[in-house]
Image: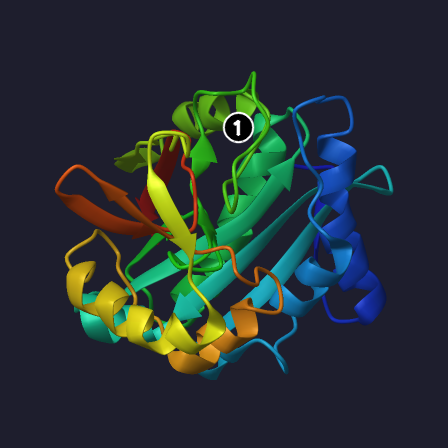
Amino acid sequence: MSGILIETVKTRKQLDQFIKFAWTVNADDPNWVAPLLMDRQKLLNKQKNPFFEHAEAAFFLAFKNGKIVGRIAAITNQMHNDFQKDNAGFFGFLEGINDPEVFSVLLNAARDWLKSRGKDFMMGPMNPSTNDEIGFLISGFDTPPYFMMTHNPPYYPEIMDELKYSKVKDVHAFYVDTTTFIHKKITQNMFFHKIRIFNQHLYFNPKFVFVTNIFILFQQNFIPSQTCHFHYQNLSFETKICLTKLLICSTKT
């Protein structure tokens, strides 16, 4: 795997390069919607994001011929391990040019970092957890991403298959037509009650991690008043995202 160099992100300049590389990979995709740069900066800020109170992460950049060709994060999440009773580590924020060698080097860097911290296997993408954006897009490339959903080039899942990463879970999507649903916005003073409902009723979901009050307050900096409550016939449910079909992969460390 000569010619590809991995650097650990240590400076603010490198972190900005890490974030902005997504613009490079997706520049020719008319359906890609760029995230707000300041939101990505806050999300990956280990001093400001409460996720890092129970998690660690290392960010890596891949270089070839002096140019950035990929990025990845390696992530530990103690809250996940405690609740799920496993010893998983995670990769996330994976972006790369259409080159399996680049993906292989990046994934190996993340896996080695997780192995050095005693993790038994690696799963992802988690960006950085199941309470954020997750998975690879495997269908729906012809539409822009929905709220809090990933969007990637079609070659991503193809390369993961080529590298023999195994599928953990398909995440299916449903489009909510608001013309057939009665809905109302959930105001800020209702949020903490909704957090309890979320934790009580979704704990059985694969790789669930509890949502904390401080996490929601942090997320409100990005997504104020986006959660809605829906009623349809005799059903009642809440949502703050519309999903597309995603894929989560894993491998042993």
Question: Residue 140 location in percent, x, y?
Answer: 48, 20
Q: Residues within 10 Å of mark 1 (few under 14, many from 20)?
A: many
Q: Is residue 69 visible?
A: no
Name the residue located 37 percent from the left edge and 61 percent from the top edge: 89
208 or 231: nearer the viewer = 231
Using residue 93 as the reference point, say whether residue 188 is left or right of it. left
Q: What residue do we see at 16% from left, 43% from top?
A: 235
Rendering quarter of residue 37: bottom right
Residue visible at 20% across and 58% down? 202
- Above or below residue 33? Residue 31 is above
At horizontal 78% and vertical 48% (from top left) the residue drawn is 20
Quarter of image, res 73: bottom right
Which quarter of the image is occupied by the C terminus?
A: bottom left
What amino acid does circle 1 point to? Answer: Tyr
Question: x and y percent of residue 58 in the render?
Answer: 58, 66
Residue nearest the observer in this picture, 109 or 85: 85
* Tally of numbered tags: 1
The quadrant in which residue 234 appears is top left
* Residue 152 coordinates in the image, percent (x, y): 57, 31
Relative to 134, residue 144 above or below:
above
For label 1, the residue is 156
Describe residue 93's horizontal placement relative to residue 229 as left or right. Answer: right
Is 206 situated above or below 140?
Answer: below
Name the one closer to the observer, 154 or 228. 228
